[in-house]
Image (cartoon, helix red, strand yellow):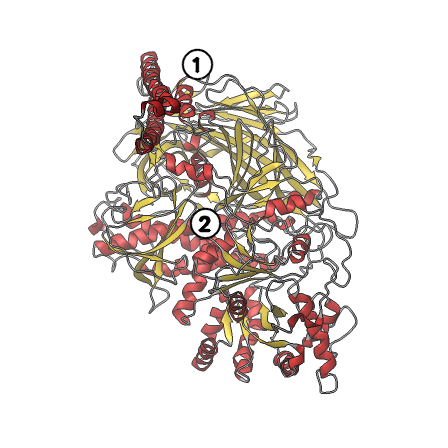
Amino acid sequence: MKLRKQVTVCGGAIFCVAVFSLYLMLDKVQHEPATRQNAGNFPRSQISVLQNRIEQLEQLLEENHQIISHIKDSVMELTDTGAVSPSGHLPFKSGNGSWVLPFDGRPSLVAVKPQDCQFAVDNHGQSDIQMLDVYSLLKFDNPDGGVWKQGFEITYEPQEWDEQPLQVFVVPHSHNDPGWIKTFDKYFMEQTQHILNNMVVKLAEDPRRRFIWSEISYFSKWWDNVDKQKQEATRKLLKSGQLEIVTGGWVMSDEANTHYFAMIDQLIEGHQWLEANLGVKPQSGWAIDPFGHSATMPYLLKKANLTSMLIQRVHYSIKKHFASTRSLEFMWRQSWDKSSDSDIFCHMMPFYSYDVPHTCGPDPKVCCQFDFKRLPGGRVNCPWKVPPKPVVEANLEERATLLLDQYRKKSKLFRSKVVLVPLGDDFRFDMTIEWDQQFSNYQKLFDYMNSHPELHVQAKFATLSEYFSAVYKAGGVAEGARPPDYPVVSGDFFAYADREDHYWTGYFTSRPFYKSLGRVLESQLRGAEILYSLALSNARHAGMDGRYPVSDYTLLVDARRSVALFQHHDAITGTAKENVVVDYGTRLLKALVGLKRVIINAAHFLVMKNKELYRFYQTEPFLETDDRRATQDSLPQQTLIELDSSGPRYLVLYNPVEQERLCAVSVLVNTAHPRVLTEDGQTLPVQVSAQWAAPTKMSTEVFKATFMARLPALGLAVFHMYSSDDSPMTLRSDTLLRLPGAGVTAHASEPLPIRSQQADAQTFYITTQSLTLGFSGTTGLLENIRLKDDPQEVKLQMQFLVYGTRPSKDKSGAYLFLPDGKAKPYNPKEPPVVRVVEGPLFSEVVAHFQHFQQTVRIHNVPGVDGLSVELTTTVDIRDQNNKELSMRLVSDIQSGDVFHTDLNGFQMQARRQFQKLPLQANFYPVPSQAYIQDGLHRLSLHTAQPLGVASLESGQLEVILDRRLMQDDNRGLGQGLKDNKKTTNHFRLLLERRDMGNASGGLFAKLFSVFRSLFPPAPRGGASEMTDSGANSFPSLLGHMTGAILNHEVLPLPVLPKKRGVPPLQTFCPLKEPLPCDFHLVNLRSIQSPVDPNSPSPYTAMILHRKGLDCSLESQSLGFNCSTTQGQLGVSSLFWGLDLHLLQPVSLTLMHSSPPLANDSSVSLAPMELSAFKLKLH
């Protein structure tokens, strides 16, 4: 071991000295211009060549540095992990108390090309308005603006439109929530079907009438229930332009809690339905009700070939600022985009709401008079006490003049003389009388305006795209292009406040049980899509598609639509009535059960060694699922694998990640003497630990078996399990119960004895080869963390806190977070029982409190799985009233007021904690990760479920885990949040050191990095504060992989015992080599048949995302070989045993196709790019 280290150090030192000498020679040549000029031997062309060669040398040196560094890491890994352990190949304890395991000895190299790191270094997008700067600029005060309470007085000169008349486009619409106060089906039966039936009749009565529709979940259900005559009439309305489908997603999705996988999937589901049934391709996006807007959505719409979009719910101070600068229409650009490729034209509605009183102009008292559903005698009236009047000859001039004044004032907020006036509200136009009232009265007003040239106005009903087309025409540009002088905006629009300090930040966490269930379903849907597509392609290749259960496609379709429905902005948000939430949960559970069937059926076919022996029986599954849920609101119960001495049980492990995976896998067994073998018969180390029925009582019948497995990318690995006498490779966990007082006792039993002791205040530790964690002796909560080779601990204190709600009339509810001040420490009635489990594969500390149980686990596994801390927090606050439970991490990282949160799992967004804003305004959505950083470290909290996050002080990160609120918050729901469930939240905590050698990027810095990798750094000194609030930041490669393993867990699928015995099985490796490690396979989705929507076509959609990488953090061994390719991927050589017959670039939702590429072509993706391809695999 010493010899290897000495050789590595000496070799590296000699290499560095040689290169450094060469660098000095080149440096001397480069920095003596006078000598060169005097000698006359260095013309400019030669200098240019020399500079190019220097740059090439820098690149080669960087690559060599990385290779040497990782060879060194691999050598250390082989020695440290027991390849030469004292006892041969048995686990043993090292000098520092951590376990060392026998390892398969395969080195792991990370070869990231310098060019693939450069994107993050050079990334400074070009925009006129960066939203983080706007937040810094604004006072966020709320002066009375007059009739436009949150704005300002608008004036105009009557002759302003003399040269160019005002064009008014009134867009009738009906906003249909797919579940909110009523369930999806009840809304459809009672209102939505009538809206669409009336639409067909009433639009046909006058060709000047228009209507737009958004939610395809409703439209498809209606379509399936109407006759051919209505279907044909609808097609005519679409063809004539009277009816427009806007956005065309399955729902109008939430943009805070949603993950980009599901956002894309619900768009695909809607667009594929439109293509198959109507032949319609949406042009414009329409998002009037999501509670804040993410920068991810414009990117997805642009990649789906939409040209324009509209948003509404934006903070009233932001709206006022944009209105005052006439920036309400802008090109929305991704903050990381240095070109204009991601630009999409966006219209921000200026006023409070999307209802009629807030859309015709700044004065709602006037606009309400032109909502003709509110005519006297109806069920709806005007709160401003001035009702609408029917338009008749006697009042026509007065009514038209009054309305035109509002149109003119609204138009003053925009740069063109084209004004958009939406006309609608929730579930409008369900009665025929409203169609008549609105359309006939408005048509009289339009006719009057248009027939009086002195008014200089042309008004009409329009679709959304007709409005956008007029704006482009007025600007003299093509559809979707940037009109002259229109601003470019980057960033997002969170958090949203609609009035006063009423911030809609509570819904980031509301009903976390269902947020978590939704994400589990998304992961299983992706896993099932990929495995089904691979199984079907392999079955076709083998000529066995007749024997494969192709009909499982109907289960996929059902799950796609259930996942899509849950992305609705009142579903995943947790803002629907209790019975509606149960309806969503029931749909999610049904879809989950179906997906598990798809997975086990596909896995069955793929692991068969001899496909001729494959038989599928609907009533006799070959595999069991990994877990089961008894009801839609219960936590999953892991499947028990029953072992006996008569023979082996087979276990199939599915890895849904596109990289090879080295990880610890835990399964439940019925014996304390399990033995696990690989497919080729090698015995693996197994750690046996107890299952706990209560904090101090273990089960005597169920045990946890944990072993280390190497799994192929997107593949299935086969293991054998036995019950046998004690083997030297089966090791029992060492369990210690730290009891709070004399009254608490431990119930221990053979065969897993435990120790117990009285808790004391002294810090205690658990350790692995990579990490050492310190815990409070009194609370059992995390206190500090130390990385391998780092002599200094980093403070990392875990705290639990409680927020109350205000005593005033405005209180927290499903939408709003209105705390009664700063959080107060959680004070349990009883001190916790703390369980400490240590062993060769994992160690954990479990702290049992009254309202939550937290498990902190570290895995003693080389690579990704062993480099982060696994946090599991099970929360139950059902006995609390008006309380919100928060988990806060307090570190000594000097992050200042800057932190980063992700947008939809797709990109990172810089945030600042603003003292000028109320506490609740500083919370943001965290769908997948948040981090703080300084000059030395980055601390990332990865989450498997969306929640609300904040960094209220330097060095802190906190998430709200659950909220129980007893009252409505006056946003229409009419209920509090009182249906809490026992909820488990899953996190990974990742601490990374900044690589000082890569900070400057110069050759000397790279050489220094080589030295530093061989000679560990000095102890941590003062960390420089990280005050960079630049909008562009990216996770490291390790950060990306940590998120991937958290969100896409390994699925253990036990083979059911067979009377006739189990036929031979083998590992299934679908990829010839893993994808480049900055690529993510978003989906491999079987495209539906154009003939039968419940059957697959021969085509598959492959959606890829190339991730942006931050290489300034220390590179770690990931446990597998990893390389990047500057965005190149050869698709034809990607899949084992399958031939590629078609490779065709398509838009993100598969609607628009480019010419096919040659089958042997490589595809190329820029960093951060999402691309979709249509494949035919056979």
Q: Nearer the viewer, mark 2 or mark 1?
A: 2
Q: Amino acid at mark 1?
A: Gly
Asked whether, in this view, residue 976 is left or right of residue 574, the answer is right
Work out which quarter of the rendered image holds the C terminus and state it: bottom left
Q: Locate residue 367 relative to residue 1113 in the image: left or right.
A: right
Residue type highlighted by circle 2: Ser
Toward the viewer: 605 or 772? Answer: 772
Q: Report x, y in % for residue 391.
A: 70, 83
Residue nearest the viewer, comparing 573 with 708: 573
Write down the residue under mark 2: 339
Q: Residue at x 45, y 82 (%)?
A: 229
* Vertical arrangement, residue 346 with respect to residue 390, above or below: above
On the rendered image, what quadrant is the N terminus found in?
top left
SS category of the residue bearing label 2: loop
- The span from disc 2 to disc 1 (Cα, nearest Å) is 55 Å
**Horizontal side of residue 123 vs 417, given as left or right:** left
Q: Is residue 1158 visible?
A: yes
Residue denoted by label 1: 95
Furthest residue in direction bottom, as rendered = 393
Residue 774 at x, y percent in the picture: 56, 23
- In the image, residue 697 above or below residue 480: above
The quadrant in which residue 976 appears is bottom right
> Residue 1120 — which label?
none
The one of 145 and 196 positioned closer to us in this rendering: 145
Q: Secondary structure at mark 1?
A: loop
Estimate the x, y position of residue 167 in percent, counting from the top left. 60, 73
Q: Residue 631, relative to residue 892: is it above or below?
A: below
